[in-house]
């Protein structure tokens, strides 16, 4: 007897069959319903025990079929995930992908595109590079600047700092211990990158307004000398949305010949705004920058644009060499795998390209302007309520405030109640040991009525 089960199973997965066509229809129908829905619930996480009880094992020898699997996802798994593009998701940094971007993410997967090399994905890489070139122009970087889309800001910052250290080594610098200078309010990914690289972080205290300035950076460079291979400036801190003194810091790094990296994962999109361009003065002098389209540029998770002033400095640090890669490394083609700490990659910049091509840049500027205006408006509302106090005036679209007399336990209970009642997702934060509340506004569908209704629950 001949057992034909393995071949038959393989055919089920890879050939066009009634079963596969049914699965395709189910998934596309669900995706259309999800993308066109207007009143999705916030939902919330549930315990592991509840998920084990509600979701029967699906990964079995014979599977459970597409219909049952999708039903488990739709009715059990998805409701156990908070909806990040909900207009009242105001914690961390939300996601608000445009419909065009989210839909095109399906096309990227359906097309089986590989985005690691020009040889295999020239068309996709060309489109991604068009977006990177547009961003570089918006940021004032010179012709010839370029880079790559990576997974997120953590990988973008790490890759830029690896290139910065390699550049310092190439100039013959060899201290006993490398160091990177940044604000004490810099994103946690800078400390994470330093741990991976086994280098020190010199955390410099910003001013009372949260802004790191050039004189403080100069003092740090005077103290630590050639140990410093890079300075990281923040363009829109996660906690407050504060932009460092980029012009003052750039003056110092240019004078000292030190690599300047700008972490703009959240806030650098604000450069597109007609409201706040002046706070980004000096950005044009950066050696590398990052911005996350999945934050304030309306793309789905996950995408970070990493741009080098001189891409060759990134290529020298990151190109991988192996015999099977010779066909790639022996050419001058633009292979995205050469510019970050990765090799295999999805062309994750394509949804941003499609969305920009669909709506135009003006629509992006208007959406970012609206978020900045809304943050300023709710800031004025907060300032006018005696039970509330602004911690800092909002600069971009993050608003941090306190409820007078509340303890951390009060904020925690309030936040939990908001989510239980499906009113909003607002997690407590803190600053200098004091608990507070925080609105991170990026979604164009968030309204002043949404925000004031949340404030009303604090009275």
Image (cartoon, rainbow, N blue to C red):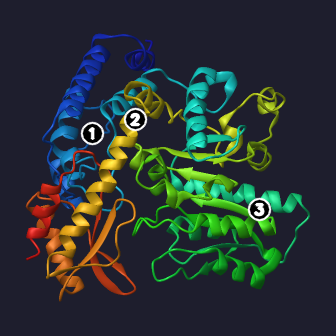
Q: Are marks 3 and 2 in contact (CB under 8 Å)?
A: no
Q: Residues within 10 Å of mark 1 (few under 14, many from 20)?
A: few
Q: Which residue is mark 1?
A: 58
The label number, if any, that marks residue 362 in the structure image: 2
Could you tell me which secondary element the residue under label 2 belongs to?
Answer: helix
Q: Position of residue 36 (x, y in %)?
A: 20, 30
Query: Is 444 left, or right, of 325 in this rendering?
Result: left
Lower position in the chain sequence, tag 1 or tag 2: 1
Query: Which marked residue is nearer to the observer: mark 1 or mark 2?
Result: 2
Q: Is residue 202 visible?
A: yes
Query: Is 245 left, or right, of 318 in this rendering?
Result: left
Q: CA distance from mark 1 to mark 2?
A: 46 Å
Residue at the spot 21% in from the left edge and 28% down from the top edge: 30
Could you tell me which secondary element the residue under label 3 belongs to?
Answer: helix
Residue at the spot 25% in from the left edge and 43% down from the top edge: 57
Q: Which residue is mark 3?
A: 165
Q: Quadrant of residue 437?
A: bottom left
Query: Is 193 left, or right, of 407 in this rendering?
Result: right
Q: Quadrant of residue 44?
A: bottom left
Q: Position of residue 195 (x, y in %)?
A: 63, 70
């Amino acid at each position: 007897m001949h057992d034909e089960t393995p071949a038959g199973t393989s055919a089920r997965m890879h050939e066009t069959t009634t079963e596969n066509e049914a699965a395709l229809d189910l998934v596309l129908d669900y995706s259309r319903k999800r993308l066109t829905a207007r009143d999705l619930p916030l939902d919330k996480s549930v315990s592991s025990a509840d998920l084990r009880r509600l979701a029967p094992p699906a990964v079995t020898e014979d599977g459970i079929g597409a219909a049952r699997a999708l039903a488990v996802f739709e009715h059990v798994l998805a409701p156990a995930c908070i909806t990040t593009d909900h207009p009242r998701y105001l914690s961390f940094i939300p996601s608000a992908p445009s419909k065009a971007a989210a839909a095109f993410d399906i096309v990227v997967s359906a097309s089986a595109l590989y985005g690691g090399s020009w040889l295999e994905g020239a068309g996709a890489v060309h489109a991604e590079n068009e977006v990177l070139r547009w961003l570089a122009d918006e940021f004032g970087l010179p012709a010839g600047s370029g880079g790559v889309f990576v997974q997120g800001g953590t990988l973008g910052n790490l890759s830029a700092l690896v290139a910065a250290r390699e550049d310092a080594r190439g100039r013959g610098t060899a201290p006993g211990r490398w160091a990177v200078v940044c604000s004490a309010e810099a994103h946690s990914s800078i400390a994470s990158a330093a741990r991976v690289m086994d280098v020190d972080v010199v955390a410099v205290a910003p001013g009372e307004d949260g802004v790191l300035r050039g004189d403080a950076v100069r003092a740090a460079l005077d103290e630590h000398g050639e140990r410093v291979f890079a300075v990281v400036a923040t363009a829109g801190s996660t906690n407050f949305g504060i932009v460092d003194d980029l012009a003052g810091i750039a003056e110092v790094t240019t004078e000292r010949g030190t690599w300047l990296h700008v972490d703009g994962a959240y806030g650098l999109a604000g450069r597109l705004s007609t409201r706040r361009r002046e706070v980004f003065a000096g950005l044009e002098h950066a050696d590398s920058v990052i911005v996350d389209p999945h934050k304030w540029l309306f793309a789905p998770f996950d995408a970070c644009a990493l741009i080098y002033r001189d891409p060759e400095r990134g290529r020298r640090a990151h190109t991988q060499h192996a015999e099977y890669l010779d066909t790639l490394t022996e050419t001058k083609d633009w292979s995205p795998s050469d510019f970050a700490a990765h090799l295999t990659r999805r062309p994750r910049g394509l949804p941003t390209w499609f969305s920009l091509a669909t709506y135009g840049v003006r629509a992006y500027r208007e959406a970012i302007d609206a978020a900045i205006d809304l943050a300023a408006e709710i800031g004025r509302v907060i300032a006018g309520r005696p039970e509330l106090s602004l911690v800092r005036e909002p600069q971009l679209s993050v608003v941090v405030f306190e409820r007078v007399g509340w303890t951390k336990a009060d904020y925690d209970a309030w936040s939990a109640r908001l989510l239980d009642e499906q009113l909003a997702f607002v997690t407590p934060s803190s600053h200098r040991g004091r608990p507070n509340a925080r609105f991170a506004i990026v979604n164009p569908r968030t309204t002043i009525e949404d925000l004031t209704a949340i404030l009303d629950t604090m009275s």
